[in-house]
Amino acid sequence: MDSPVWDPVELVSRDAMAALQTERLRGCLERVAGRVPFYREKLGAAGIAPSDIRSPEDLARLPFTVKQDLRDNYPFGLFAVPMDDVARLHASSGTTGKMTVVGYTANDIAVWAGLAARALSMAGVNRGDIIHNAYGYGLFTGGLGLHYGAERMGAAVVPVSAGNTRRQVELAQDFGATVLCSTPSYSLLIAEQAAESGANLNQLRLGIFGAEPWSEEMRAEIETRLGIIALDIYGLSEVMGPAVAMECPAKAGMHLAEDHFIPEVVDPQSGEPLPDGETGDLTLTCVTKEALPLLRYRTGDLTRLRRGRCPCGRATARMDKPLGRTDDMLIIRGVNVFPSQIETALLRAEGLAPHYELRLERGAARMDELTVRVEASDALHRNPGALSAAGPGLAAALQSSLGLACRVEIVAPRQLPRSEGKAARVVDSRRM
Ligand code: DLL
């Protein structure tokens, strides 16, 4: 598949990228030190002036920013421009506490549209495509973020948003949608609905899926069900929204827009920078953002970086599929496990559908108990012998691959809740 390079900066040498990042980082420090009291104090305490920055490695001398800092300065306390210059606000709810509010100037939105166009182009989208954009439109950044990118590149975008799946499938069929943008979990619901209503989605060739962790096994499942190529897109509202990083058709990691967001991976506990190839907390510094420039923002997403040139020719740093967020890690009787690892194991098992739920309870002896509830495929459901063996088989596979003892409940097809946005697969009643 063609994957045209949108911006020549994607091809520059490491040295040229480092020079650009250094210059932008200095400018960013000048702006935040001058305009954001929070950063003025932090930089003052650390004794760092913008002129001290000589290379991107000097980032390690700067203070971190964490989500709590955004909450403490709710709603606009970290903004680096007056409200007159703010053109848009988004917010994300998170699971606990106040919303996290983010702001953009008109120029921030223009940069974002350019980066979203870069991501779409990297995926192989072109002007002739019809993009069915089923990310939620609203306070969530997914819908509008990719919408502006699609318009910038000149493709036709259908702002269908999430929900009303039956109508979505009809529209995708009638309009001949060629590209689907949605969460990976919602793409499965779309595939299910299309199969049920006998819709013809043959024009669809590409999916751009992100906003939640999804395994390679889930990718294979989606590609087969929809007959498309499925690529991964990463982003977070604090930093911008979708298109912070995008996978190219080589499927060899997501290319970070590191001319705007300087990536580091740090040890989740100590905060020490880790060498490329080691897994830790992805930390991003937004060097060009005007309204909300964050220094060393700890995303909480666990991944690793690679900096070699990709088979596609691009030279930008790449990140692996995130395993999950540090705060999504389940600790079950001392075993640390991410839901995505359980997903991998259950999709490797024969006859199970990609719909599952993880229930955590505190059992009688005050021990944590995990129940994995997963749907049988239609074929498995019709085969009683195989069906009764499937539960113990999956339990044994989870025990041997993750060291995890759990109960497995195989439920009938279409019994578990479906999601239109980010899937909520963990029900943790230990703290309720
Ligand atoms: O999810 C932005 C987005 C929209 C990304 C559409 C991609 C597509 P938030 O709601 O702020 O923003 O959530 C950000 O979602 O820190 C990750 O934990 C997770 N996440 C996003 N993309 C991926 C991905 C949007 N491709 C949080 N793989 C991030 C795994 C992802 N996790």
Image (cartoon, helix red, strand yellow):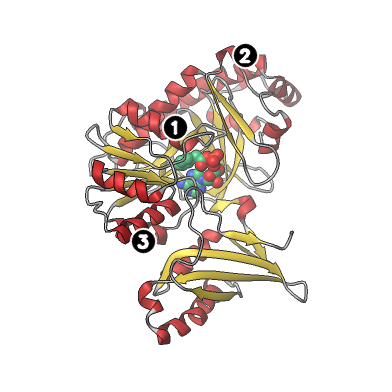
**What's the residue at 43%, 70% (across, down)?**
413
**Viewer-nearest of labels 1 and 3?**
1
Classify residue 432 as left or right of residue 122: right
Residue 311 visible (yes or no): no
Q: CA distance from mark 1 to mark 3?
A: 27 Å
Q: Secondary structure at mark 2?
A: loop
Q: Is residue 372 above or below residue 289?
A: below
x, y (%) of residue 94? 62, 43
**What's the residue at 69%, 37% (across, down)?**
98
x, y (%) of residue 117? 35, 31
User: Which quadrant would the C terminus be assigned to in this image?
Assistant: bottom right
Report which residue position mark 1 lands on: 144
Report which residue position mark 3 lands on: 221
Dot 3 crowding, Cα within 10 Å, few <14, some 14–19, many 20+: some
Label 2, ligand 1: CB separation under 8 Å: no
Q: Residue 156 sits in which quadrant?
A: top left
Report which residue position mark 2 lands on: 82
